[in-house]
Image (cartoon, rainbow, N blue to C red):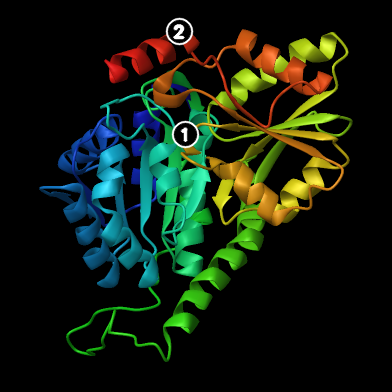
Amino acid sequence: MRSQIEGSRAVAETVARCRPQVVCAYPISPQTHIVEALSALVKSGRLAPCEFVNVESEFAAMSVAIGASAAGARAYTATASQGLLYMAEALYNASGLGLPIVMTVANRAIGAPINIWNDHSDAMSQRDCGWIQLYAEDNQAAADLHVLAFRLAEELSTPVMVCMDGFVLTHAVESVELPGATEVDRYLPRFQPRQLLDPDDPVTIGAMVGPEAFTEVRYLAHATQLAALARIATLATEFRATFGRPVAGLVSPYRCTDADTVVIALGSVLGTLKDTVDEMRVDGVPLGVLGLTAFRPFPAAAIAGAIGDAKRIVVLERAFAPGVGGIVTADLAAALPVAGRTVHTVVAGLGGRPVTRASLRDALTAAAAGTLGPLTFLDLDERLLRHTAKEAMA
């Protein structure tokens, strides 16, 4: 049934229909509404059997999820920003142990200075921790990707984070078709863990691994990520067959077929980009947009197929690596041959700064004209920079 619903509530209702057996929670904006809604569902009995565990920190939330998953329960949690950093050690443990935990990351900037608004700095900082990362363009995708995430995590026995832009999506009320419980049950089989802590059949999970086998362990983690490329595409196809609507798989191309310039981006900014491209197409500028749903594993082949013969690539980054530049850009350059193509990085929307059609139009016009630099900070306030430098030298 389609309804006007807050993004966080849509995610909570969808997660509940995936029947988690343990939900562990520590509140941090902007994900708090998700776990609050789940706690109410557990208390009311609508989500049962399920144990809702209030913990004292984000590290504890992931630790409880690890214990629950290792004991054979379908486990879920959510976090954002500094909370994701606080559980970083446990993130590596979850992926290293091959535990199929699903976690929502309500993307938010990392301080200092303190900032509660949206960018992708938090999830990007954990891009190498071994978790699959899926990014939602809108709240329909955010809800649907959670169903796919549980299926993917449990098939490959590996953790998955679903990233949705904080406040922009989590607190926005949109029209969402919630996945039906019957369809979810048909799409998502009952959880059958590959490994299980059982007192009657004791095994060791997470034992010490020395130099003689550690490389092989890490190689298997890499192989699992590569296997996810094919499974994500297949599961997206199966999702459409089950629910009667598409869910983005690895990538989501928009008007790329005849584009000279393709803009690559993740998350909710894709909507603004598509509007901008539509406006510029009317003026005869051949632009396209390629949304990345999967960032880990990095879908190099799918990107190459979508961008075709485009002469210019503009990567719109909602986070960046100081001293280097674009994070997605670096992955793109490493994975794809760029001979004959110009690649630009545009850093935009850090700390929740609005990304407007006017600013995007200026940048994309410059890209099409060949005057855009290799690294651009959209709407950079030069006056503020001069003032800050002056104050620092005083």
Q: Amino acid at mark 2?
A: Arg
Q: Which of labels 2 and 1 is toward the front?
A: 2
Whether residue 213 sits left or right of residue 110 in the image: it is right
The disc, 2 or 1, on the residue closer to the chain's N-terminal end is 1
Q: How many marks?
A: 2
Q: Which residue is mark 1?
A: 178
Q: Residue at x 77, y 28 (%)?
A: 288
Whether residue 20 sits left or right of residue 139 in the image: it is left
Q: Nearer the viewer, residue 269 or 393?
A: 393
Query: Where on the picture, by quarter, is residue 75?
Result: bottom left
Query: Residue 14: image x %, image y %?
Result: 40, 40
Q: Nearer the viewer, residue 35 or 108?
A: 108
Find numbered disc 2 in the image and state the secondary structure of the residue it sits on.
Answer: helix
Work out whether 176 lies above or below 198.
above
Work out whether 59 lies above or below 370.
below
Query: Where on the picture, by quarter, is residue 115?
Result: top left
Query: Residue 391: image x %, image y %?
Result: 29, 14
Q: Residue at x 29, y 42 (%)?
A: 79
Query: Residue 282: image x %, image y %?
Result: 83, 9
The crowding category of the residue bearing disc 2, from other C-alpha atoms within 10 Å (few below 14, some 14 to 19, many at least 20), is few
- Label annotation for residue 40: none
Q: Does residue 265 appear anywhere in the picture?
A: yes
Q: Which residue is mark 2?
A: 383
Q: Nearer the viewer, residue 184 or 11?
A: 11
Q: Residue at x 39, y 63 (%)?
A: 100
Whether residue 23 sits left or right of residue 210 in the image: it is left
Query: Residue 69: image x %, image y %?
Result: 29, 66
Q: Amino acid at mark 1?
A: Leu
